[in-house]
Image: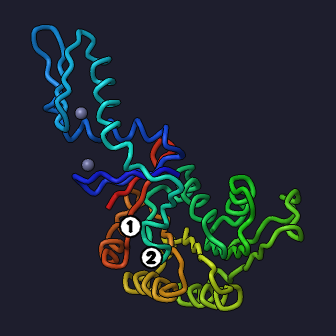
């Protein structure tokens, strides 16, 4: 992906390629410099804050579009290519993915992170969704994938994927198990599957369920211990959460503020930093 970070504020965006970054940079810089566009004498003028260029035109929309393109040219050299969101935390940290858990936006970030992982571990209430996503969106299967779920994979109703052909294991957990046992299971999966040099992509898509069923301390400890377990292993823990949909989740996330290295959201096919 292409990556651009604004040097006036903490904004960072990732887009599929350099061309699609044009829209992001121009609109973002225009918001910082809205005073540079003025309308008087029936005409619209923009006056670039970075250089001596100024233009006046009758067509306001055209003038604004031209100004955005002009602003983009000032930062075009700062756009990096071949970037991964995980690089932002050096593939060693905790990322809050702000999106409804079962949404296309969350899936876009799952596919992005898992495509960068060698050992992919997904703790999910919907194992089939994860397996299909990896099958359909990734160019190749990660070296090793382990899906952990309290729900069984529907082998009978979804027979089209041949599990003997792909490097995957589905671990079915007893639904009565608490976060501590889930965490221990993940830790053992890392012990059993990690090889030196692996980047670990660990997805937790069941945080809403954990917050609903357990107290605040248990939910926080779960994240802290998983995060500690990944320290030094080289891995990104992703918490898929929709804080807007559940005030209790929002409260727990406030307590985890020090633990979370990056908040990210997906918008119109691009990823943006939220804090
Ligand atoms: Zn900015
Ligand atoms: Zn300029």
In this view of the protein, can residue 149 be seen by the observer?
no
Please indicate whether residue 12 sits to the left or right of residue 57 in the image: right
Badge 2 element: strand
User: Residue beneath label 1, please?
Assistant: 262
Label 1: state its secondary structure.
strand
Q: From mark 1 to mark 2, how far is it between C-alphas?
A: 8 Å
Residue 153: % across, % down: 77, 68
| Tags 1 and 2 touching, CB below 8 Å | yes
Q: Residue at x 34, y 64 (%)?
A: 247
Which residue is label 2 attached to? 93
- Residue 47 visible (yes or no): yes
> Measuring 36% from the left and 79% from the top, which residue is drawn there?
259
Mark 1 crowdedness (10 Å alpha carbons): few <14, some 14-19, many ≥20: some
Q: Quadrant of residue 211?
A: bottom left
Q: Residue at x 70, y 71 (%)?
A: 151
Provide residue 15's location: percent of width, then percent of height.
Answer: 49, 47
Asked which quadrant contains residue 107, the reply is bottom right
The residue positioned 17% from the left and 19% from the top of the image is 45
Q: Which mark is residue 126?
A: none
What colour scheme does the image use?
rainbow
The tag earlier along the polypeptide, 1 or 2, is 2
User: Compared with residue 194, is residue 240 higher up or lower down, i.e. above or below?
Assistant: above
213 left or right of 274 in image: right
Expressed as whole percent of the image width and height from the top left, the position of residue 182 reads 59, 85
- Residue 164: x percent and y percent? 89, 71
Task: Give the quadrant of residue 156.
Answer: bottom right
**What count of labels does the image hold?**
2
Q: Does mark 1 have its CB less than 8 Å from ligand 1?
A: no
In terms of depth relative to the viewer, which is nearer, 205 or 143?
143
């Amino acid at each position: 992906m292409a990556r651009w970070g604004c040097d006036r504020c903490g904004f960072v965006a990732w887009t599929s390629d350099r061309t699609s970054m044009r829209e992001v940079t121009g609109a973002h810089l225009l918001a910082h410099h809205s005073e540079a566009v003025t309308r008087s004498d029936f005409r619209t003028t923009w006056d670039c804050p970075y250089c001596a260029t100024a233009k006046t035109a009758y067509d306001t929309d055209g003038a604004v579009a031209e100004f955005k393109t002009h602003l983009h040219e000032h930062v075009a050299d700062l756009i990096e290519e071949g970037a991964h969101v995980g690089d932002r935390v050096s593939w060693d940290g905790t990322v809050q993915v702000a999106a409804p858990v079962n949404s296309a936006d969350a899936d876009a970030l799952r596919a992005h992170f898992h495509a960068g992982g060698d050992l992919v571990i997904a703790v999910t209430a919907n194992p089939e969704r994860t397996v299909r996503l990896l099958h359909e969106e990734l160019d190749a299967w990660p070296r090793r994938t382990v899906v952990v779920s309290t729900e069984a994979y529907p082998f009978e109703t979804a027979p089209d994927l041949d599990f003997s052909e792909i490097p995957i294991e589905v671990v079915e957990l007893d639904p009565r198990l608490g976060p501590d046992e889930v965490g221990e299971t993940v830790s053992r999966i890392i012990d059993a599957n990690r090889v030196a040099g692996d980047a670990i992509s660990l997805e937790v898509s069941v945080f809403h369920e954990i917050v609903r069923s357990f107290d605040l301390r248990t939910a926080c400890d779960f994240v802290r211990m998983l995060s500690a377990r990944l320290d030094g292993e080289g891995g990104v823990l992703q918490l898929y959460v929709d804080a807007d949909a559940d005030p209790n989740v929002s409260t727990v996330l406030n307590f985890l503020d020090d633990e979370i290295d990056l908040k990210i959201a997906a918008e119109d096919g691009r990823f943006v930093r939220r804090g």
